[in-house]
Structure formats: structure tokens, C-alpha cells
Image (tube, rainbow, N blue to C red):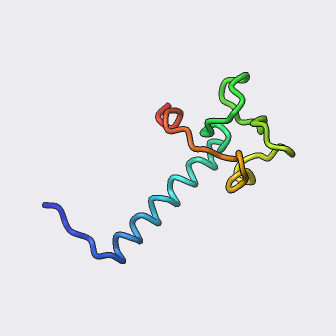
Amino acid sequence: MTETLTRPERAQAFAEARRIVRDGIRERGGCAFCTRRDRTFGIGRIATCGLHPQKQFPRCVGQPGGFEFDEISAHD
């Protein structure tokens, strides 16, 4: 049976899920999950995405032309 969560419980569950996803991305190198990464070296953990000056994850988050989550690479 599926339990219905209250609004505060649902908010807490989403906050926890966001934290888990962010931690996983940081642990594996955020640039590897960006659509703008340089694919020359395979994994793409280096900050060569074209930002000036170049910034490595998570410093690029919120910058124009910065981090854009690549949903396809998240499944690899």
C-alpha cells in the first residue's frame, strides 16, 4: 500500500533526494555530468567548457553558460 506524504514530509523527501544527487555528482566530478564538458579525454572531469575564466564544478553552477545537467551521462 502506498502512503500519502504530508506536504512537509514530501518537501523533506525531495530535499534529501536533492542532497543525495548533489553528493553523488560532486563525488564523481561534476564536469562529467555537464552537457558542455570537453569529451576529448573521455570522462571530462576537467573544466574546459568555454567559461571565461574557466571554472570547475561547482563554481560554474549559476554562471551564464555554466553547468547544464546531462541526463544521458547520468545513466552511465
Residue 38: which quarter of the image?
Answer: top right
- Left or right of residue 4: residue 58: right
Residue 67 vertical placement versus 35 (above, below): below
Q: Residue at x 68, y 56 (%)?
A: 62
- Left or right of residue 72: residue 63: right
Q: Residue 1 at x, y = what percent? A: 13, 60
Q: Residue furthest front?
A: 64
Q: Residue furthest left?
A: 1
Count of marks overlaid on the render: 0
Q: Residue at x 21, y 69 (%)?
A: 4
Q: Residue at x 26, y 71 (%)?
A: 5
Q: Residue at x 69, y 31 (%)?
A: 44
Quick one: 10 or 62, which is closer to the camera?
Answer: 62
Quick one: 29 or 58, which is closer to the camera?
Answer: 58
Q: Residue 63 at x, y = what percent? A: 72, 53
Residue 9 vertical placement versus 69 (above, below): below
Residue 48 vertical placement versus 17 (above, below): above
Q: Residue 27 at x, y = what percent? A: 62, 47
Q: Residue 45 at x, y = what percent? A: 71, 36
